Amino acid sequence: MKIYSERFFIKYLFSNRGICLGVDLKDRSYLFLICTRGIILRKRNRGDRVVEDLDYEIDRIYNTIAGKEEGMKK
């Protein structure tokens, strides 16, 4: 089950796999993700569509964000 809203400056996604919150400000966005695999809080580019592009799937969002961070560390 997934419940989400993209209407307001605070966007949310609730699913059986976790919770994802997004906050859009004038010049930046923040993504807060809580799931069984961990917790992520990241500053994102304004207009970033990672959640929408990954079809609102919590595990895919986590993998993408965590994978990009691992790639940056190398």
Image: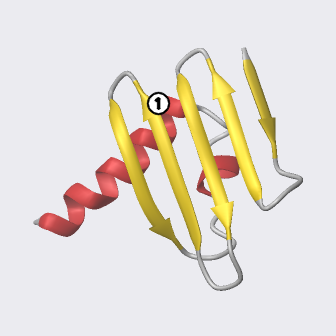
Looking at the rendered structure, the number of numbered marks drawn on it comes to 1
Q: Circle 1 sits on which residue?
A: 59
Q: Quadrant of the C terminus?
A: bottom left
| Residue visible at 70% across and 49% down in the picture | 52
Depth check, front residue: 17 or 70: 17
| Residue visible at 59% across and 78% down in the picture | 28
Q: Position of residue 31 (x, y in %)?
A: 53, 55
Q: Element under label 1?
A: helix
When asked about the image quadrant of residue 37, the answer is top left
Q: Quadrant of the N terminus?
A: top right
Indicate the colouring scheme: secondary structure
| Residue visible at 66% across and 37% down in the picture | 56
Instruction: Name above or below for residue 23 compared with residue 15.
Output: below
Mark 1 Cα within 10 Å, few/some/many (few <14, many 20+)? some
Instruction: Name above or below for residue 1 compared with residue 14.
Output: above
| Residue visible at 64% across and 76% down in the picture | 46
Instruction: Name above or below for residue 32 compared with residue 55.
Output: below
When asked about the image quadrant of residue 48, the answer is bottom right
Q: Is residue 37 left or right of residue 29?
A: left
Depth check, front residue: 34 or 58: 34
Q: Position of residue 12 (x, y in %)?
A: 71, 42
Instruction: Name above or below for residue 72 compared with residue 55.
Output: below
Q: Which residue occupies the extreme right position in the image?
A: 7
The residue type indicated by label 1 comes to Asp
Q: Is residue 8 left or right of residue 40?
A: right
Q: Position of residue 41 (x, y in %)?
A: 41, 53
Q: Which residue occupies the extreme bottom position in the image?
A: 27
